[in-house]
Amino acid sequence: MSIAADTRPVLRLSSPTATRELYLFIAILLVGAGFTYASPYFLTPINLIQTLRAALELAIVSAGMTLVIIMGGIDVSVGGILAVTAIVIGKSYQAGLSSFLVAPIGLATGTLLGTWNGFLTTKLKVPPIIATLGSMYIFSAIMFIVIGGAWISGLPGTLSPLVNGTVLHIPASALVILVVYAACWVLLRKVPFGRHIYAIGCNETSAKLVGINVDRTKIATYALLGFLAGFAALLYVARLRNVEINIGTTVALEAIAATILGGTSIRGGVGSLLGTLLGVIFIRIIQNGLVLIGVSSLWETVIIGILLIVVLTADAIRNRNNPRV
Amino acid sequence: MVFKLSGIVKRFGGLVALDHVDFHVADSEVMALVGDNGAGKSTLIKTMSGAHIPDEGEITMLGKVMHFRSPQDAWQNGIATIYQELALAGKMTVVDNIFLGREMKRPRFGIPFLDLPAMRKRTDELLTQLDVHVPGIDSWVESMSGGQRQGVAIARALNMDARLIIMDEPTAALAVAEVRKVLDFVIRLREQGKSVVLISHNIQDVFEVSDRISVMRHGRCSRYVRPAKLPHKKSSAS
């Protein structure tokens, strides 16, 4: 019996996320071709680089969201984490701290808020959607109390090369996304921690039985999402040099949409980072293209909403035919 | 003596589910547990596997007194219970399931990378040892038949060096050919020096593979029976 032979399909097209990734890639090409035809400004280096920069924070947050959703969790408060962290960063800069101090303070704030969500869902046994909804209200309140409806502006752009710079003609924002996704991929696929995330999403009882520390893994994963939201906040401040009152309002839902469009199962246990990245690109291209052809950005949310419903309905139909999935 | 229960009492309110049960399993022994519904079989295996904490009595494993607080506790101490629902992660591969929670690592730059080649090799050895045939060790477990999944669950128990393997109705809901396969797994476990507690409604299965049969009635192990050594049993065990 030669079962040790590598039986993994070369392109892994048999896996459900690979099929979704392929469809999403084709959809990006089709939508891109449509916008190129409709607007002469779409397929220009400047526009594509701008779109990439606009995708930076969403891409980073979505990587963490993918890990959380694969684990069977969800975090709707991630926009609040980003907002509160951005305010902490803004206030730290205003207090005269240098970027060497502000960066770790920002990352620590995000991680702490993520850990708080992990604590609520594990130790207090609050269902993740309720726990993080509560957190979202708390974080929004903190934001309004601290900045009281005014912008924090005139912040230094010390970290802006990470967003606007280039390395060997490659936009730095693309490299930042690449590094974040590569690190998350290693975490998810190459070390035991990632296996535990998948196992908890698949079958939490089984994960507990074999001795996986489920609570610790969950808290660490929420903390990681918080850390990434903190990093996104640093880049947000570097990009815009101010903190607006509407910061982070859409990022949580966009990150969830990108993750689900990318093939990650909302019920946990299945998902891929590549799919999520394609989901982010898809969302940002639609937003950018609609603006270029002069269509109200409201339609972008309608399109993404419809797509989500279509994708989730297709999943539900497939699962109905195959109850073991 | 690998595993011994002495004077185990378990009450649920006024109901005495286990009434001073004495039970033991020796090395390389397959002990079957039979009895009517409500006789206390489920309560007994839940007590052995750490899901229930007994009100009275003593559990010893390899001569050491054990106080299991949870199934994890029992599992970490070498008692693997293979439930009907199997507790496998369906959307993970055979390799992933067998090594879940005890992955083999090859640290580089201080990062505990998974040692996939080693895990695949060990999976191959375990499946060969048990003669489990699966479509591929990288296939999702949920795509497999009931018998194959039993095989994966048993391979996982073997991999964690379980001394006592408790199988709850392993042949229920299996096709005839698959039942044969699972009974062969049981025989192979015994050959490798493991002790097995087998709970089954199918008396034919029980007679075929077990060394002793414990009959439960009204929360007591009323008697032990030694099934006659049937000729086909000897041939399959040898």
Image: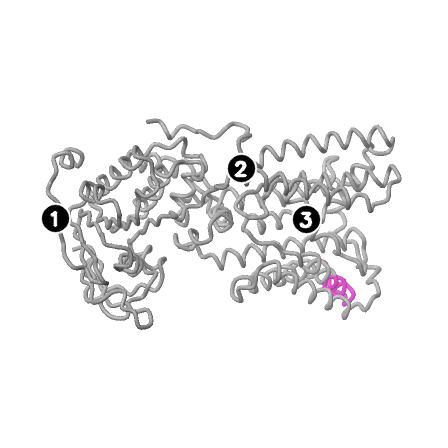
Q: Nearer the viewer, residue B101 or B203?
A: B203
**Which residue in the structure is indicated by mark 2?**
A321
Disc 2 to disc 1, C-alpha distance: 47 Å
Residue B36 spot, x, y in % from top left: 25, 55
**What amino acid is found at the position of numbered circle 1 in the picture?**
Arg
Q: Quadrant of residue A118?
A: bottom right
Please check the rendered image and state whether residue A89 is part of the magenta-colored stretch, yes or no.
yes
Instruction: Identify the residue at image location x=12%, y=48%.
Output: B226
**What amino acid is found at the position of numbered circle 3 in the picture?**
Ala
Query: Could you tell me which secondary element the residue under label 2 belongs to?
Result: helix
Disc 3 to disc 2, C-alpha distance: 29 Å
Would you call the spot at circle 1 few (<14 residues within 10 Å), some (14-19), or many (20 or more)? Answer: few
Marked residue chain, label 1: B
Q: Nearer the viewer, residue A268 or A275?
A: A268
Residue B117 spot, x, y in % from top left: 41, 35
Q: Nearer the viewer, mark 2 or mark 1?
A: 2
The span shown in magenta is: A87-99
Instruction: Identify the residue at image location x=72%, y=35%.
Output: A168
Residue A154 spot, x, y in % from top left: 84, 59
Marked residue chain, label 2: A
Q: Is residue A199 above or below residue A97?
A: above
**Which residue in the structure is indicated by mark 1?**
B226
Q: Nearer the viewer, residue A217 or A324?
A: A324
